[in-house]
Image (cartoon, helix red, strand yellow):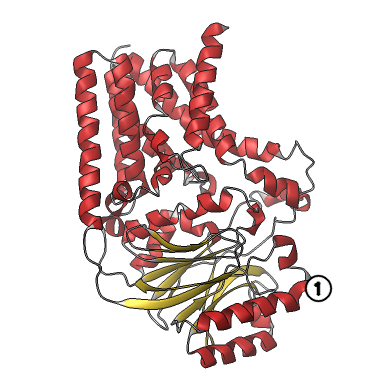
Amino acid sequence: MRDRVVPAALLAASAGVLALAFPRANWESVAWYALAPLLVVALVTTPRAAFAWGWLHGTVFFLVLLRWLDFTFRTFSEIPWPLTWGPTFLLAAWCGLFVAIVSGLVGWLGRRRSPAWALATAPCLWVGAEWLRGHLLGGFPWGTLGYSQYLRLPVIQVAELGGVHAVSFVLLAANAALAGVVLLPWRRALLGLGLAAAVVLGVLVFGAWRLGEPPRPGELGVALMQPAIEQPLKWNPEHVVVTLGIYLELTRQAGGTQPDLIVWPETASPTALRRDPGLLATLTALSGQLHAALLIGSVDVLDAPPNRLSNAAFLVTERGIVGRYDKIHLVPFGEYVPLSRVIGFVRGWAEFIADLEPGSRTVVFPGPPAPFGVVICYEGIFPDLFREFVNGGARVMVNMTNDGWFGRTSGPEQHLAMYPFRAVEHRIAVVRAANTGVSAFIAPTGRIVGRLGLFQRGVLADRVPLRHGRTLFTRLGDWVAWTSLAVAAASVGVAARSRA
């Protein structure tokens, strides 16, 4: 019993602490060592036990990280508390399974080859598992380890080369080196520490160099608004006039900053814009008066398929609607139900479950005032999709979102923490307009240069730089993840052919 209780307590504690590396606690330093206990336990036990311990660690980590989901289910579903923790636990267990696979393989490699071999492979195993978690069954890349470092600008500049997974690789290398100090002979332990230190030093030197570069010419004036309208009021028919009054007043305030573009949040319009000629006429006239294009988030009633709804972004000028983008990557159990023929009944459990039609292609608005792309809600946490807009010619990226479903929890802050990486990956400015927060301007360096806090109503305006050139990540995408998967597979293959 003691042999189980002690590792369980150690791993549960390290998993809980690791979750605090992310917002809102932002204890980002712990991500450099909090996984070392898991690696040590995996290498001193059987592979089957290592798998189980990894599943415990991963499930606890995601349960603590995603604890904000309980607010959503308690507030907007018919599920009684404490059963509201059920969906969160299932999601945490699914995500924790990938940690279990890494832990089990580390333990197995340690048995088949050596602990040093296993620790050297661990960063590739981890990055490969993160990539798979972000793609299988629609993908859920929330909690990717590298995101914990979003405030450490010198560290995250390497995302220009290999994306967020490059930062995860560096963090795992540091954790593996620390585990080696406990498990390996001193010479090998020193070698591991030296290699990890060299990698970290290289990342910091590269980061300092990139942060020291002067900005390039070319700017765009953008204003965004955060109406801070509570989610229950957002679609209340009795609140439509008040809601529109808030948006129009904020739009006029934004126009006073003389921007080229004014951004509303996701599904901001309380009516379907394209089916509301009065509102469209008002916005068209307002665009002409302010000499600024308006980017409006709205639900749309589609002509084909008939009467289906989409989550859309409309570009409105003095000529009316001049462009639109329909959200491609819908939120599972939020905007559609996977396997709806089998489990479609869950729609009746929660008011946040919709049935929307996904868009079919990315759209880069040619302007006015300059080419820009739009990712709606959590589309922006998928690097591959974001990259399509940049390769399509976007020189600025906009994220419009509604995180009002998450209230005043850490969920909106965790969502925001992913966008500095999208900025660095392509050296592109990101404009983020959120209904209840957190709205922000993010520089190409990943620095959050302006923000509005949760439920803070107001306007934010800035001159954002235009993108120049293409980074290595823009060109090659997730090559670090693909390489990690290849190295991990090769390491497992070599170990499988060796004698036990």
Residue 13 on image: x %, y %:
52, 25
* Residue under the image location 22 percent in, 65 percent down: 214
The amino acid marked with disc number 1 is Glu
Residue 128 relative to residue 399: left or right? left
* Residue 139 vertical placement versus 64 (above, below): below
Structural crowding at the residue carrying mark 1, measured as other residues with C-alpha within 10 Å and reported as few (<14), some (14–19) or many (≥20): few
* Residue 366 vertical placement versus 354 (above, below): below
- Is 258 in front, or is 124? 258
> Residue tagged by mark 1?
238
Q: Is residue 399 visible?
A: yes
Residue 193 relative to residue 395: left or right? left
* Residue under the image location 44 percent in, 43 percent down: 144
Residue 175 on image: x %, y %:
34, 29
Q: Provide the secondary structure element on which disc 1 rests.
A: helix
Residue 359 on image: x %, y %:
54, 67
Residue 226 relative to residue 202: left or right? right
Q: Quadrant of the N terminus?
A: top right
Q: Quadrant of the C terminus?
A: top left
In terms of image quadrants, where is residue 105? top left
